[in-house]
Image: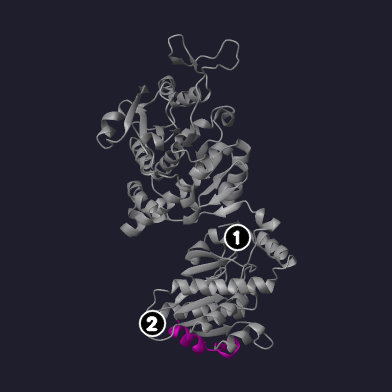
Amino acid sequence: MKLVTVAEMRAIEQEADAGGLTYDLMMQHAGRNLADAVLDLMAAAEAEEELQVLGLVGPGNNGGDTLVALARLAEKGWKARAYLVRRKAEKDALTAALEKAGGEIHLAEKDADFQQLQSFIETADVLLDGVLGTGFKLPLKEEIGRVLAAAQEILTEVEWPPLAVAVDCPSGVDCETGQAAAETIPADVTVTMAAVKQGLLKLPAFDLVGELRVVGIGPLEGLASWQAIRDEAAEAGLVSGLLPPRPSDAHKGTFGTALIAAGSVNYTGAALLAGRAAYLSGAGLVTLAVPAPLHTALAGQFPEATWLLLPHEAGVIASDAAEVLGRHLERVTALLLGPGFGLEETTGHFLSALLRGAAKKTAGGRIGFVQPADGGSDPGALRLPPLVLDADGLKLLAKIDHWAALLPAPAVLTPHPGEMAVLTGLTVDEIQRSRLETARRFAQTWGHVVVLKGAFTVVAAPDGRTTTIPVATPALARAGSGDVLAGLIVGLRAQGVEAYAAAVAGAWLHARAGLLALEMLGNPASVLAGDVLEAIPDALNEIT
């Protein structure tokens, strides 16, 4: 699903109109597709009487889309009513078409006490909210605000409220900023036209959107303004296409080896969460490289893993662990660094030594970490596999000069806003105010994929593309959740999925697993990272 600003959507429509896909044609496409979406939503309804739909119809294009949809539903046998808000019925071809199809037209201006509105809502199966569209800016006009407030109150009092379907966006939402009027009717489903508007994936608007669906407004693929859009919102169909095949004649080598260097005595579980997530993503073999004292605590909980025990200092990875790790990379197809590292200086030295690539084969065939005497490249130098960096690994990374040039490109970086602040020098507030553009800017600057975690996680590629995960839930706001995400991504990288695709698929699966865990447990306060982990198979089952 393409993700657009209001200005970008306006430019697309203008180019389409100039090219022959007129505004009237776009409205006809949008309205018919909206009606089809309603029919799909209500396909399972077993009504003894005809289904009823009420449309709140405003003066703009969203009102026009709604009238077209009402006429189509009337033609399908529905009882369709339009309740016009600041829109005149006279000389309106769309209201005439609705009446011709058997629909009814009613005027809000003649319903001062909203008794008519109440009776219509009480009998409706579906309420179409088509009062205001993407061009809306706060504050609400008084007359529109009164109608929306009345409808909102009636909906809270009705014993069996209709399915509330917002047309393009809930009326009262600013589709640029995500701000919303208090009178905005919360939607069960928002059917948005052509592309998702960026404001719908911001709070508080997102909490009013409900399920998000996109329908077409006509052929746009040939438009330069459409092709120029580099931002998208992830959805199940997109992610399904990113997952690697699993042929019947596969063996464990088919699906790669993920090596996960993680953990310390203070963060023992990080390695376990990341390792299990890597396996659940489909990796063929997962090796955990951990400080030696952690092995006893973890091995009994993870019999499927193989182990690489690293030198340690007081239970954290020691600087000379780089040599040990370097000797075990030959068959590794993806490497994760960082979960549970801690911030001790010796672990920072380990990361620096590993990334600086100062390895060469000694006469005995052993890999060491000494620069060639002439300063040139060494044919025996250590080559790092595709890389994912997370958590404390990112904070330690920020202390290494010119770190971006040391990573095999493109690496995947998975910072939360605090870690992003350490990497960039920006404040957390600056990052949060402009999450999408911040992720894009630094992915391009560094030449690596950035996964900016949080509500509406943004995945940004070095070439300027971004994908936003349309999920915001406190169920994922829990220690260990990021370890699960990093494990998913490295597991997909190990299977040969390219960096940006692995980051998008991993972030979507992680978010979906969080929602499924929430459904299972019922309260976001009770969702642990392990619950998210256990829900990964269900998330995969939904799309494979």
- The answer to whether one can see residue 502 in this image is yes
Query: Residue 177 bears which disc, if any?
Result: 1
Q: Is 121 included in the stretch rendered in magenta? A: yes
Relative horizontal placement of residue 108, taking residue 359 as reference (left or right): right
The spot of residue 496 in percent (x, y) is: 47, 38
The spot of residue 268 in percent (x, y) is: 33, 35
Tell me which residue sits at (32%, 30%) in the image. 306
Q: Considering the numbered disc 1 on the image, is that residue within a helix, a strand or a loop? A: loop
* Residue type, mark 1 in image: Thr
The spot of residue 491 in percent (x, y) is: 42, 39
* Residue type, mark 2 in image: Ala
Tell me which residue sits at (49%, 27%) in the image. 384
Which of 240/387 is in front?
240
Query: Residue 42 bears which disc, if any?
Result: none
Relative horizontal placement of residue 210, taking residue 9 as reference (left or right): left
The spot of residue 184 in percent (x, y) is: 53, 72
Magenta-highlighted residues: 103-124
Which residue of the protein is positioned furthest toward the right in this rendering?
A: 18
Residue carrying label 2 = 47
Q: Is residue 507 above or below residue 346?
A: below
Q: How is the image coloured?
A: one colour
Q: Nearer the viewer, mark 1 or mark 2?
A: 2
Q: Is 473 included in the stretch rendered in magenta? A: no
Mark 1 → mark 2, Cα distance in angstroms? 40 Å
Q: Quadrant of the N terminus?
A: bottom right
Relative horizontal placement of residue 228, taking residue 522 as reference (left or right): right
Q: Considering the numbered disc 2 on the image, is that residue within a helix, a strand or a loop? A: loop
